[in-house]
Image (spheres, rainbow, N blue to C red):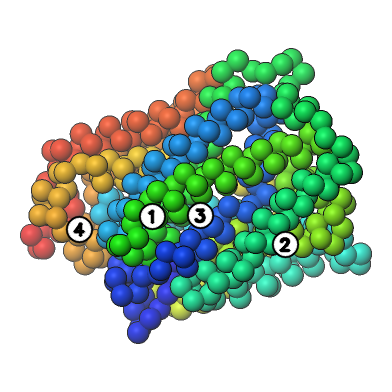
């Protein structure tokens, strides 16, 4: 959504230490926990929106390129997270120092909160539309009230079971909504030819591909889930759980269903998560509401968990580490509810556009660090992440991060619309290149305090 999938076992707080091998999850349990991500209505709606704006063919090409890109990058990330057991928060200390890492956790938990607001609002609106007499604000409160307790437990002994139980219902619902749409409205191949009135946009596939770079926060999610994987399962997680099969289903299958539904089911107003959800509920009745609840509850277990865990890690940097994780889940719930009450969606979308640039740069720097042999040479294979050993500000990571982010934001805001589509790729390559070059000339004192040698 930095954080971690926290669990406290034998008084060990995994916001502060690497996950030991003895507390890792078996591959089935971690798979069920992680696949909560695959069921958001967002994946259906965004693909349909891209097809409407750029053409179905371009949307599919963009989806295929995103599937491959995400699978490759997350395969690398998953292997390293499993190898080290570090969270995004702990690894960010290596890259940016103690204080620099706080920005990574801030971006992570803020983004996870934003997505919690979006996906929670979708459930609330569906409930409000179906249940007469329930105000929208009451529906918001209901959603938050049941979502917060769901993430009191750990991923190892609760979220894996919950999401494993709900996954078949999501799959069945996805099939059912397609079947019922065809039964009610008939089948037409029009969904294969969606696009703007003027026809498919030339090179629109690039717009579709770069749009998905805006949700690279999933790379951070991957990191914090993967750290709970066992060493002997690293290949499975890299290739399957966080690899091609996951993204083929999450992006491509969901995307194709979304495009088909958008072309088949009439929706009121413009295409959005809300309009699609209301159309599904109208089509399927109570079963549609259950399908939406299953879909959005699964994804929001991940969003709420990442938000609370990262908030815990962030404020732990400022002397609040002794406040229990459960308290932070309640704080997240309060913040999410308040954001639902106030119409701040336009501001949130603007904030996400900027934050995505920082996230893309973070991913690039992480990949450069993992790929370069220089750090291992400096520290003879050891990873220095303890708070009392790392420097407050690491010039290597921070210089690369802010340089690339500033370049990306400049291109996003001050170039043409066509040039703006290159902001995320330019951010990625500039961050990777800058960090690689700086790391090659880095000194130990950049990473660890002088008194620690």
The x and y percentages for residue 207 are: 56, 26
Q: Which residue is mark 4?
A: 383
Dividing the picture into quadrants, the one containing residue 353 is top right
Q: Is 337 situated left or right of 352 in this image?
A: right
Q: Earlier in the sequence, mark 2 or mark 4?
A: 2
The x and y percentages for residue 106 are: 45, 56
Q: Earlier in the sequence, mark 1 or mark 3?
A: 3
Q: Which residue is mark 2?
A: 293
Q: Are marks 1 and 2 in contact (CB under 8 Å)?
A: no
Q: Earlier in the sequence, mark 2 or mark 3?
A: 3
Q: How far, Cα to Cα, is label 4 from label 3?
A: 25 Å
Q: How many marks?
A: 4
Give the number of the mark in front: 1 or 2: 1
Q: Earlier in the sequence, mark 4 or mark 3?
A: 3
Give the number of the mark in front: 1 or 4: 1
Q: Residues within 10 Å of mark 2 (few under 14, many from 20)?
A: some
Residue in the picture at 47% in, 44% down: 244
Secondary element type, mark 3: loop
Q: How far, Cα to Cα, is label 1 from label 4?
A: 24 Å
Q: Which residue is mark 3?
A: 1
Give the number of the mark in front: 2 or 4: 2
Give the number of the mark in front: 2 or 3: 2
Dividing the picture into quadrants, the one containing residue 97 is bottom left
Secondary element type, mark 4: loop
Toward the left, the furthest residue is: 453
For the question of whether residue 310 can be seen, the reply is no
Q: How far, Cα to Cα, is label 2 from label 3?
A: 20 Å
The label on residue 236 is: 1
Looking at the picture, does residue 27 appear above or below residue 321?
A: above
């Amino acid at each position: 959504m930095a954080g971690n999938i926290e669990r406290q076992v034998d008084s060990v707080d995994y916001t502060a230490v690497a996950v030991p091998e003895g507390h890792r999850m078996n591959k089935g349990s971690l798979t069920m926990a992680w696949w909560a991500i695959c069921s958001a209505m967002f994946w259906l709606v965004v693909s349909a929106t891209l097809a409407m704006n750029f053409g179905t063919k371009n949307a599919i090409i963009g989806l295929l390129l995103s599937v491959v890109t995400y699978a490759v990058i997350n395969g690398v990330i998953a292997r390293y997270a499993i190898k080290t057991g570090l969270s995004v928060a702990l690894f960010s200390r290596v890259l940016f120092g103690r204080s620099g890492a706080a920005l990574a956790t801030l971006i992570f938990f803020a983004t996870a909160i934003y997505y919690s607001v979006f996906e929670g609002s979708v459930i609330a609106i569906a409930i409000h539309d179906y249940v007469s007499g329930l105000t929208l604000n009451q529906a918001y409160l209901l959603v938050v009230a049941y979502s917060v307790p769901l993430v009191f437990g750990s991923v190892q002994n609760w979220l894996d079971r919950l999401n494993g139980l709900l996954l078949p219902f999501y799959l069945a619902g996805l099939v059912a909504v397609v079947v019922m749409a065809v039964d009610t409205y008939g089948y037409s191949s029009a969904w294969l030819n969606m696009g703007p009135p003027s026809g498919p946009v030339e090179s629109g596939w690039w717009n579709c591909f770069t749009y998905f770079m805006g949700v690279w926060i999933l790379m951070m999610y991957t990191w914090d889930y993967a750290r709970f994987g066992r060493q002997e399962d690293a290949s499975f997680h890299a290739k399957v759980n966080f690899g091609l099969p996951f993204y083929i289903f999450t992006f491509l299958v969901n995307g194709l269903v979304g495009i088909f539904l958008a072309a088949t089911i009439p929706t009121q107003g413009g295409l959005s998560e809300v309009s699609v959800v209301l159309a599904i509920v109208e089509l399927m009745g109570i079963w549609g509401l259950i399908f939406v609840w299953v879909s959005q509850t699964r994804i929001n277990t991940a969003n709420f968990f990442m938000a609370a865990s990262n908030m815990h890690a962030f404020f732990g940097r400022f002397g609040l580490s002794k406040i229990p994780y459960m308290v932070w889940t309640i704080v997240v719930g309060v913040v999410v509810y308040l954001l639902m009450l106030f119409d701040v969606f336009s501001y949130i979308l603007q904030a996400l556009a900027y934050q995505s640039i920082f996230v893309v740069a973070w991913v690039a720097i992480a990949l450069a660090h993992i790929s370069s042999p220089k750090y291992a040479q400096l520290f003879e294979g050891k990873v220095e992440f303890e708070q009392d050993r790392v420097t407050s500000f690491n010039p290597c990571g921070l210089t690369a991060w802010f340089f690339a982010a500033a370049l990306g934001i400049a291109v996003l805001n001050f170039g043409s619309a066509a040039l703006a589509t290159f902001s995320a790729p330019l951010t990625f390559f500039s961050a990777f290149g800058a960090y690689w070059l700086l790391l090659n000339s880095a000194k130990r004192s950049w990473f660890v305090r002088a008194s620690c040698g």
